[in-house]
Image (cartoon, helix red, strand yellow):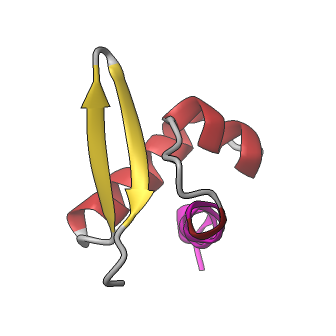
Amino acid sequence: MTKVDKVIEQIKDILRKDTRGLTIQELSEKTNVSRITAAMALMKLEGAGSIDVRVIGNCKLHYLRSNK
């Protein structure tokens, strides 16, 4: 399992518990990784259809999809 795969699992757990939507910065702080690593994990999750992204201004909020 690669570092990004571990971060993906951590992000899924965080988003399950916190349903208000989190930014890349908030997720990187909660997982103790760089913003780039968090962004890579979020891109994989978005590509797999596991998360929804809501753009507000220049900010992206990430939510776990309820059907997955």
Give whichever of 35, 23 is nearer the camera: 23
In the image, residue 61 lies in the stretch drawn in magenta: no
Question: Magenta stretch mostly in which secondary structure?
Answer: helix
| Residue at the image point whose x is 26% and y is 31% from the top | 55
Left or right for 62, reference 52: right
Q: Along the line of sight, which residue is nearer the eye, 48 or 1? A: 48
**Farthest top residue in view:** 57
Number of disc labels: 0
Up/down of 24 relative to 57, above or below: below
Point out residue 58 in the picture as x, y percentages from the top left corner: 31, 15
Magenta residues (range): 1-15
Residue 47 location, quadrant? bottom left
- Within the image, what quadrant is residue 65 found in? bottom left
User: Horizontal and vertical percent for residue 11?
Assistant: 58, 61
Q: Is residue 6 magenta?
A: yes
Q: Nearer the viewer, residue 62 or 7?
A: 62
| Residue beneath the point at 36% across and 84% down | 68
User: In the displayed structure, does residue 51 sit left or right of residue 16?
Assistant: left
Residue at 36% x, 64% y is 45
